[in-house]
Image (cartoon, helix red, strand yellow):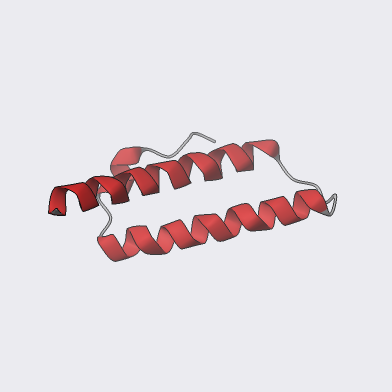
Amino acid sequence: MALPKVQDVRELSHEQVAQQIIDVKKQLMQLRLKQATQQQVKPHEFRHAKHRLAQLLTVERERQSKSV
């Protein structure tokens, strides 16, 4: 599974970016909970979620700095 592309994030609206940030943070929390309770977790899921969150936050920050 390839890492998501930042261009895909840039095409989203402000509301979609904000909603996806919340969704990815929830996903990371669920992965951490699974890991803490010793359930089976695929390690690459952490990497993909963190990468996606970084992309979303970067695009959100870029948009905030352009509007100021």
Closest to the observer, 15 or 2: 15
Residue at 49%, 34% (x, y): give it.
2
Residue 12 horizontal/vertical position (percent): 28, 55
For the point 57% across and 60% down, the residue is 26
Q: Quadrant of the N terminus?
A: top right
- Single out the residue that lies furthest toward the front: 68
Whole-percent x, y for residue 35 in the image: 77, 48
Left or right placement of residue 24 versus residue 62 in this view: right
Q: Which residue lies at the image location 67% right of the left edge and 58% below the top edge?
A: 30
Find the residue positioned furthest to the right: 38
From the viewer's perspective, is 18 left or right of 62?
right
Which percent across, then down, holds residue 7?
A: 29, 40
Judged left or right of residue 44, residue 65 is: left
Q: Residue furthest top?
A: 2
- Against 4, is 67 above or below? below
Residue at 58% over, 37% down = 47
Give coordinates of residue 8: x percent, y percent: 32, 45
Judging depth in this view, the residue of 26 and 40 nearest the camera is: 26
When the figure is inspected, residue 3 is found, relative to residue 23, above or below; the finding is: above
